[in-house]
Image: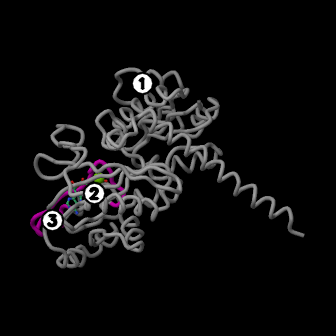
């Protein structure tokens, strides 16, 4: 039994999803016998007190509205509660991007999920591509532009896109929930799509679009990485955009996906390898695009995947024989192991220093 702090809400566009994920995580932790203290982060980044956070988690509230207080002093809420492990359930920016792991590192608190580097690389679609390509993993070809370069010479970037066949997908570097993502089937729409994506980030990627299947695999582990059964997202029309994810529930989530065993095995192998390549620990959902029968590409790595009642990550583990309470229990155990190892390094360095003449 551990005393686990579940941190949720936050400043990103995925604030509301985070609340739903946190409800499921807290429930699973309690079922596994852990004590849970919730920590809610309002939409402006302020940490609300434990009572207010519990009310959100136990109730129907969909957001934690801006609290209008300075952020830094409110973090005392976390320190005051005396938790043994932090379970960060904050999707996207100011959370999943490495900032929450960073905060836990500074406070010397064990936490669930990958460390700062893996989290920061995985949320960055351009760095992820570079790291995965260097590890020999298949990723889609892309072109990228910064806002400054695009403003200076938009024509030069649009010309560079000519080598990529249509359709194209335009996306912000650090996106999530498909915010800012557009599919374009006509080059005349490229400029507008790049400007749109630049509203959400300072750097935008344009990649070759795959007309095929969208597959997902859950990974779990520390050192030795396990990969789950494979799931499939089937959007009703177009692609898996923000509306399909959260507004109209139109996409179907199929698990397990109907795939030849050899393809599923290859995908699982790539999922674990991609996670290892970014230095992952704990958990991630690795998303793929499958073109035809054999064109498999890693699309992205989500180090804090959705945990809602219908989310793919817990569902893939459930069908792989690991129900939610055991899943979150494993994640807590990994967090404690990792923290112990980090401590050992710290002790080793200090003892080496003390032995120096
Ligand atoms: N290269 C691509 N080919 C086909 N579909 C894509 C491609 N890139 C993105 N998509 C579609 O857009 C969705 C969102 O893109 P993704 O890269 O996963 O960003 P996010 O981090 O916002 O989820 C994907 O789930 C998929 O439906
Ligand atoms: Mg995605």
Region rendered in magenta:
173-193
Upstream in the sequence, badge 3 or badge 2?
2
- Residue identifier under label 2: 264
Residue 321: image quadrant is: top left
Q: Residue at x 39, y 48 (%)?
A: 92
Residue 246 in percent (x, y) is at: 24, 39
1 vs 3, front mark: 3
Q: Which mark is residue 292?
A: 3
What secondary structure is marked by label 2?
Answer: helix
The reply to whether the C-beta atoms of the residues labelled 1 and 3 are less than 8 Å apart is no
19 on left or right of 163: right
Foreground residue, 46 or 248?
248
Picture quadrant where residue 172 is located: bottom left
Q: Is the residue marked by circle 3 packed among few (<14), some (14-19), or many (20+) residues within 10 Å?
A: few
- On screen, residue 327 above or below 139: above
Cα gap from disc 3 to disc 2, whole angstroms: 14 Å
* Residue that badge 1 annotates: 56
Please tell me which residue lies in front, 98 or 355. Answer: 355
* Residue 250 on image: x %, y %: 15, 40
Q: Can I make out residue 260 in this image?
A: yes
Regarding mark 3 in the picture, which secondary structure is present there? loop
Q: Marks 2/1: CA distance?
A: 39 Å
Secondary structure of the residue carrying numbered label 1: helix
């Amino acid at each position: 039994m551990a005393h686990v702090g579940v941190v949720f809400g936050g400043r990103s566009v995925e604030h509301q999803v985070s609340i739903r994920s946190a409800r499921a995580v807290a429930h699973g932790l309690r079922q596994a016998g852990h004590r849970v203290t919730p920590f809610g982060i309002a939409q402006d980044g302020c940490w609300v007190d434990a009572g207010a956070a519990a009310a959100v988690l136990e109730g129907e509230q969909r957001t934690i509205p801006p609290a209008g207080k300075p952020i830094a002093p409110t973090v005392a809420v976390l320190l005051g509660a005396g938790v043994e492990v932090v379970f960060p359930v904050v999707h996207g920016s100011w959370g999943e991007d490495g900032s929450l792991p960073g905060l836990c590192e500074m406070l010397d608190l064990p936490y669930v999920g990958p460390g700062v580097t893996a989290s920061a690389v995985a949320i960055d679609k351009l760095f992820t591509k570079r790291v995965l390509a260097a590890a020999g993993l298949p990723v889609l070809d892309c072109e990228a532009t910064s806002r400054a370069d695009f403003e200076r010479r938009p024509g030069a970037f649009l010309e560079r896109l000519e080598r990529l066949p249509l359709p194209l997908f335009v996306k912000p570097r650090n996106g999530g929930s498909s915010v800012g993502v557009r599919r374009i089937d006509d080059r005349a729409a490229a400029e507008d799509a790049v400007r749109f994506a630049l509203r959400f980030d300072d750097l935008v990627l344009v990649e070759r679009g795959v007309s095929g299947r969208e597959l997902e695999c859950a990974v779990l582990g520390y050192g030795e990485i396990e990969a789950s059964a494979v799931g499939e997202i089937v959007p009703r029309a177009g692609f898996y955009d923000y509306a399909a994810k959260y507004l109209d529930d139109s996409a179907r989530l199929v698990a397990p996906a109907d795939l030849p065993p050899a393809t599923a095995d290859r995908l699982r192998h790539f999922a674990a390898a991609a996670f290892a390549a970014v230095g992952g620990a704990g958990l991630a959902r690795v998303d793929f695009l499958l073109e035809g029968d054999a064109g498999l590409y890693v699309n992205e790595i989500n180090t804090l995947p959705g945990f809602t009642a219908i989310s793919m990550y817990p569902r893939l583990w459930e069908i792989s024989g690991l129900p939610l309470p055991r899943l979150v229990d494993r994640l807590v155990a990994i967090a404690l192991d990792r923290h112990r190892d980090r401590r050992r390094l710290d002790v080793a360095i200090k003892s080496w220093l003390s032995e120096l003449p």
